Image (cartoon, helix red, strand yellow):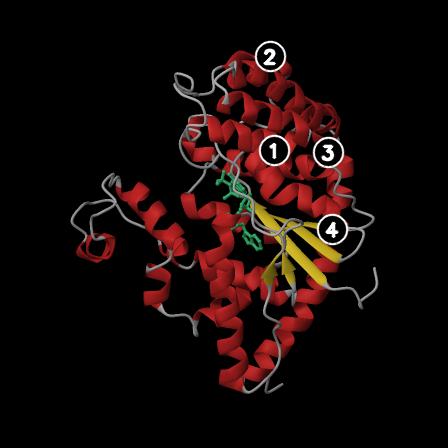
Amino acid sequence: MSSEKEIVLSGIRATGNLHLGNYYGALSKFVKMQDDYDCLYFIADLHALTTNPQPEALHENVRNILAEYLAAGVDPDKATIFVQSDVPEVSEMYLLLNMHVGIGELLRTASFKDKARKQLGIKDDSQDIERQIIGNETNKRVNAGLLTYPTLMAVDILIQKAHKVPVGKDQEQHLELTRRFARRFNSFYGVDLFPEPENFNFGDHAVKVPGLDGSGKMGKSEGNCIYLVDDEKVLRKKVMRAVTDEGPKEPNQPISQPVENLLTLMELTTAPEIVQSYRDAYADCSIRYGDLKKQLAEDILKVTTPIRERYHDIRNDDAYIARVVRQGAEKARERAAATLKEVREVMGIRKFY
Ligand code: ADP
Ligand code: TRP
C-alpha cells in the first residue's frame, strides 16, 4: 500500500447481518475501491452500543459482519480490516473533538431525531422531539451516546485523515457534519490537519436501495430486507411476496412506487435491456409481476449465492478472523496514534514529564 494513494475509510455498525442496501450502498464499493486506494474498512461496534445491544449479540454481530466483508471480497492483503474498539485512540479523540461540537447541531441531525423518537416510543414525527427529550415527560431516556454519534463517526474518518468515504445516501448528513467539524478544527487552531472527506460513488449519485414492502429504503429495522446470507428458499419467498400494485390500468401511466422499487432493485442486479423490457411491458399493460419477480430473484441469487457460501466457512474460522483483525488493528492504530498525537499537541495537551 503506497501512501501516495488517497485514503478511503468506511464502516458498518455491528447490528445484524448485511442486506442488499448495505451491499450496494457500501460493501460492493469497498471491494471495487481496494485496488486503487489505500483502504481501511472497519466494524463499528462502538456505534452499535448506542442502541444498547445484548453483549453476546454484539460480539456475534461483529463476527458476522467481518465474515461478510471477507466473503464479499474485501481482501485483507489489499485493505486494512479492523474492529473500531480495537483502536482506543478513537475514543480519546472522540472526547477531544466533542469540545468543538454544538449540542444544537447534533440535536438537529435527522438520524438522531429518528432514533430518539424510537427510543422514546414516539410515532408521530410532527412532535417537537427536543422538548420531549429535555422535558423528560416520560421515564424513557435517550442516551448521550446517540446524540454524539456524529462526533464518533467524524473521528473514525478524521483520525485516519480519510479523503473518501463510501457510504449510502442516508449517511450524507453525517459526512456533511464531518466536513464541518474538520473545517472548524483546522480554522480554530490555524492548522491544516484534516482533509475534508467526501462520499464516493461509481455512478453519479449515492445509491438508495428500496425495500420489498413498497415504501421506503431497505433497512434492518424496517423488516423489509433481503440479506446476503438468506438461503435460496427464503430469498425466493421474500421476492415473490414483495408488494406490487394491481397492474397498470391504461397505457403509459406513471409507474407506481412499489413497482418502481422492484425495478430499481432490478437495475442493480439485472441486464439493462431486460429491465427496459419490463418498463415497456408496464407501459403497454402487458407486465406480469410473477415473471418480473422470478427474474429478480434469479439475478439477486447470482450475486448473493457465492457470498453466502464463503460466509459460512469464514465465519467458523476463528483463527483466520483473529489474524485478519489483529493485523488490521495494528495498521489502523499506528495511523490513529500519529493523528492523535498531533491533535493533542495542537490543542495544548502537552506532557510535563
Ligand atoms: P441499516 O439502515 O439497515 O441499519 P446501516 O445504517 O448499518 O444499515 O448502514 C450501513 C451502510 O449501508 C451505510 O453506508 C449505509 O449508507 C448503507 N445502507 C444501508 N441501507 C441502505 C439502503 N437501503 N440503500 C443504500 N445504502 C444503504
Ligand atoms: N454511521 C454509519 C452507518 O450507520 C457507520 C459508520 C460509523 C461509518 N463510522 C463511520 C461509516 C465512518 C463511514 C465512516 O452506516
What residue is shown at x 57% (from left), y 23% (from top)? 278
CA distance for labels 4 and 1? 21 Å
Q: Earlier in the sequence, mark 4 or mark 3?
A: 4
CA distance for labels 2 and 1? 22 Å
Residue kind at label 3, given as amino acid type: Ala
Do the residues under discs 4 and 1 have CB atoms within 8 angstroms? no
- Residue 188 at x, y = what percent? 49, 84
Q: Earlier in the sequence, mark 3 or mark 2?
A: 3
Can you identify the residue that label 3 sits on? 71
Mark 2 residue crowding within 10 angstroms, few (<14) / some (14–19) / many (20+): few
Can you identify the residue that label 2 sits on? 233
In the image, is 71 to the left or to the right of 125?
Answer: right
- Residue 255 at x, y = what percent? 44, 29
In the image, is 27 to the left or to the right of 148?
Answer: right
Q: Nearer the viewer, residue 261 or 99?
A: 261
Residue kind at label 1, given as amino acid type: Glu
Q: Earlier in the sequence, mark 1 or mark 3?
A: 3
The C terminus lies in quadrant: bottom right
Task: Find numbered disc 4 in the image and state the secondary structure of the residue it sits on.
Answer: helix
What residue is shown at x 24% (from left), y 54% (from top)? 133
What residue is shown at x 54% (from left), y 66% (from top)? 92
- Residue 125 at x, y = what percent? 25, 45
